[in-house]
Amino acid sequence: TIIVGKKESLEVNEVVANNLNMFIEDKEFSCSVKLRYRSVSTPCHIKIENEKAYITLKEPAFGVAAGQLAVFYDGQKVIGSAWIESSK
């Protein structure tokens, strides 16, 4: 099925990710995240609860899909990752 719509309808501002692989102990922090392999990093705020990362993007992202890897960065340093479960 092909659905035609406006680009704005594809905006994602919140992402939920699971199967965390973290290199820091913090449960709430700000960092940047890459949601696609070749995407630019996006500033975000992350809250970890019940083995899931709740990611609030500070700028909308496009083309985010379940099953992709979200990688968290502090500058150039990888501080964790998780598999995208859902977005809105």
Image: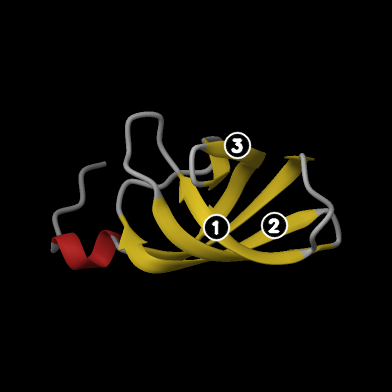
Residue 53: mark in rendering:
2
Check disc 3 and report the residue beneath it: 78
Q: At label 3, which amino acid type do we have?
A: Val
Q: Quadrant of residue 73?
A: top right
**Which of the pair 62/31 is nearer the observer?**
31
**Which of the pair 38/77 is nearer the observer?**
77
Check disc 1 and report the residue beneath it: 31
Question: Can you give x and y, in whole percent of width and height, for residue 18 in the image?
Answer: 72, 47
Disc 3 is placed on an element classified as strand
N-terminal-most mark, 1 or 3:
1
**Which of the pair 47/75 is nearer the observer?**
75
Residue 48 appears anywhere in the view? yes
At 79% from the left and 60% from the top, the residue drawn is 26
Cα separation between marks 1 and 3: 10 Å
Q: Quadrant of residue 46?
A: bottom right
User: Callout 3: few (<14), some (14-19), or many (20+) C-alpha neighbours within 10 Å?
Assistant: some
Q: Is residue 66 above or below residue 5?
A: above
Q: At label 2, which amino acid type do we have?
A: Ala
N-terminal-most mark, 2 or 3:
2
Residue 7: mark in rendering:
none
Question: Can you give x and y, in whole percent of width and height, for residue 64 in the image?
Answer: 40, 47
Q: Is residue 31 above or below residue 22?
A: below
Horizontal arrangement in the rendering, residue 69 relative to residue 42 (left or right): right
User: Callout 2: few (<14), some (14-19), or many (20+) C-alpha neighbours within 10 Å?
Assistant: many
